[in-house]
Image: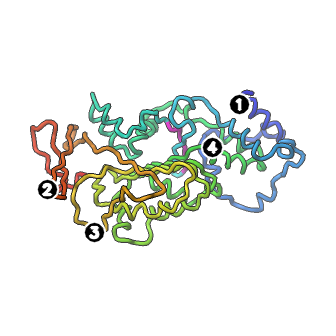
Amino acid sequence: MAVDTIKSRVKAFFRLSFGGRKRLENSSLDCEFEKTEDDSEQASYNLQLTSSFFRDIPIEIRKMIYGLTWEVPYEDRYHSPRGRHIHFQDGHWSNTRCVMFEEDEDLDSIQKNSKGNLIMWQERLSSTWGIRHWRCEERIQHKRNKSVDRTNFMSMMLVCKRMFPEIVESIFESHQFLFNDLFSAHRFFIYSPSPYVSHIRNLDLSLNLAFHDYAPFITKLPRSRVRELWEALGRISFLHNLRISLDIYDRGPWRKIPEQGVTAQLKDLDVLRDFTLELPPELAIKTDAPNMQNLDPLEETPFKVIRRPPLRYWQFGPGEVEHFKWETHRKGRQSHCFITLAREARHIPNPYLIDFF
């Protein structure tokens, strides 16, 4: 049975006046992100006791029906067919489709393809949305085909009040939620959480944070926005898949970040299937700062750690991207890593001195 036919028949079970109700044209998730305003309004729901849809069809089957309504065009084009980027912008929530390709799973794909306009590729390499979602960021920065982002969310939520909570639960359970900035993630999970947050099953966080967001882990302050976010994730009971990508804004000196402290709370999360933690490369650059314990590769953790490859292209001067490589020298038990340019026309100071990485 066609999906459109299913949606039409589901709506036919409910109020005849549905067609006269004004339909919102945008596809944002504003409605389900807001907290329930008044319990008395919930008490006024029509329980639809005479409706065969609610009376005769179990909730499990109803959720399967709802799941069919989320099948929309373009799903087969992208690696994450039900991935939705969620961001709070200009005072309201918006969501856009994830247009990541399968080859973007290769964390070295940008540098492998860096040719032609190197400045354009370098901008993609430094994307605040992470190496895997640079296409998604470029879409919202430029004129795009907005039909790719359309969903059936609002039309289904407006069918009736009795169906509304089941529809929102289905949305949260059936889609992958992707956040690419700490402000939106913190607002969604902590500042103004939806009562349906616990129904999220698939979550992807790509956080390129300013150094001050990591500072509480160095000074061991008890509170920070990142700690609050980790605590909120712990309250989601049935996370199936979780991926967290961490970095410093503009690819700053990761060696100054205490990995053990930042990830300590993540070790308590209960993820049913796949839990991946993506981190910058581990380079042999000495640091004398205190509390800089890196993750022990031999330690058993509930998450799988993957490291991004070291950068090989960067814009050291305005308007010119240069190719370089990392060399490691060993002296006794100690090793030391530094940059050498592929084109030795000029000297680049050692990153150990200038905090390039």
Q: Which residue is mark 3?
A: 290
Q: Quadrant of residue 60?
A: top right
- Where residue 1 appears, as percent x and y from the top left, is 75, 27
> Which element carries disc 1, helix, strand or loop?
helix
Out of 36 and 333, give the one closest to the viewer: 333
Kind of residue sitting beneath label 4? Ser
Mark 4 or 2, closer to the camera: 2
Between the residue at mark 4 and the residue at mark 2, the CA separation in whole angstroms equals 54 Å
Kind of residue sitting beneath label 2? Lys
Between the residue at mark 4 and the residue at mark 3, the CA separation in whole angstroms equals 44 Å
Asked if marks 1 and 4 touch (Cβ < 8 Å), the reply is no
The overriding secondary structure of the stretch rendered in magenta is strand
- Where residue 90 appears, as percent x and y from the top left, is 50, 49
Could you tell me if residue 89 is visible in this image? no
Mark 1 or 4, closer to the camera: 4
Mark 4 or 3, closer to the camera: 3
> Which element carries disc 3, helix, strand or loop?
loop
Mark 3 or 1, closer to the camera: 3
Please report the bounds of the magenta region as a residue range.
Answer: 92-98
Q: Earlier in the sequence, mark 4 or mark 2?
A: 4
Between the residue at mark 2 and the residue at mark 1, the CA separation in whole angstroms equals 66 Å
Q: Which residue is mark 1?
A: 3
Q: Which residue is mark 4?
A: 174
- Number of other residues with Cα within 10 Å of mark 4, as a class: few under 14, some 14 to 19, many 20 or more: some
